[in-house]
Amino acid sequence: MLAQYIMLVFVGLLIAPVAGGLIAGLDRRVTARVQSRFGPPLLQPFYDVAKLLGKESMIVNSWQVFCAYMYLLGAVLSVVLLFLQSDLLLLFFVQAIGALFLVFGAMSAPSPYSQVGAQRELMQILAYEPLLILVFVGIYLATGSFQISEILTHEQPLLFKLPLLFIVLGYALTIKLRKSPFDFSTSHHAHQELVKGVTTEFSGPYLAIIEVAHWYETVLVLGLVALFWSTSLWGMLALLLGTYFLEILIDNTMARLTWRWMLSYVWIVGLVLSVLNLSWLYAS
């Protein structure tokens, strides 16, 4: 049992960022093909991070450095908890604390781009965190537990019982991946009006840390998606591929929204879908 836990921690610590980087590279390739471009190599995200790690360390203040490491720590711990099949609520609080440290780091810099980016990142957190809680409540009502190890033993795919909450999780996925129409705090596209928003004042090795933390977050959210079809490996892979391709398609076909529109749309639509699914689950 101890060897199994050590193996799971190893996978969470080392394999997850490699998978996250490959997903980011594949994302760029597919996006380029959708836009009729050839696109960068699959390993380009790793080249970018290696180049950032080799740059001179330039910081605004020491608090910014601390926040970058805490953001990475929060992302790493949440992924390790996912692979250890721990409690969903514990995982939720760890990732939430990590996400807040990115906002704190951006706010510590006296830059208008960084300040506005931090405020927008905070709005995004306020938009997706309540939805994640409702998704976890739905999973609890369907399986009787917040423990991932017990959720994985559920006999039927959760997607059949929680179809509307899966759509709600899709909203959170779009926001966490910083894709259009919810990419207004920062974006991997060149059209970002706020330079790089919340990451404007991070550079060199500390920007590399944030990029690696984002890879961990990508694996975390896709891991939550996988819970909806945990009864079959092929079903899980099909669900992950279909969901991520849909995210790329939405990212390339929709314009960025304002934060007011995002909050009202995500909360109203997300809450209505959640209440409908939870009511149906409770009645059945």
Image (tube, helix red, strand yellow):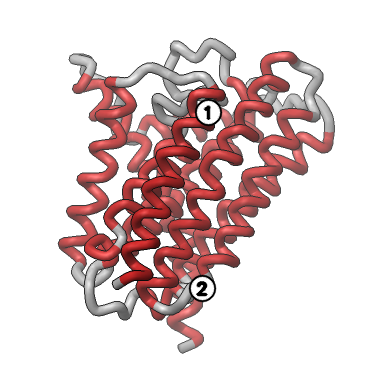
Using the rendered image of the protein, determine whether residue 46 is visible from the camera's viewpoint: no
Residue in the image at 27% along x and 55% along y = 163
Q: Is residue 263 left or right of residue 39?
A: right
Residue 180 in the image: x percent, y percent? 40, 25
Residue in the image at 20% along x and 21% along y = 34
Q: Is residue 279 left or right of residue 259?
A: left
Which residue is the extreme one toward the bottom?
Answer: 1
Discs 2, 1 touching: Cβ within 8 Å: no
Image quadrant for the C terminus?
Answer: bottom left
Tally of marks: 2
Q: Is residue 69 above or below residue 124?
A: below
Give residue 144's quadrant in the image: bottom left
Residue 176 in the image: x percent, y percent? 48, 40
Front residue of 110/11: it is 110
Give residue 116's quadrant in the image: top right
Residue 106 in the image: x percent, y percent? 71, 29
Front residue of 93/218: it is 93
The secondary element bearing badge 1 is classed as helix
Q: Amino acid at mark 2?
A: Ser
* Label 2 sits on residue: 86
* Label 1 sits on residue: 51
Real-space CA distance between mark 2 and mark 1, rounded to the nearest whole angstrom: 35 Å
Residue 121 in the image: x percent, y percent? 61, 32
Using the rendered image of the protein, determine whether residue 190 is visible from the camera's viewpoint: yes
Q: Is residue 12 above or below residue 3?
A: above
Q: Amino acid at mark 1?
A: Lys
The secondary element bearing badge 2 is classed as loop
Residue in the image at 28% along x and 66% along y = 158
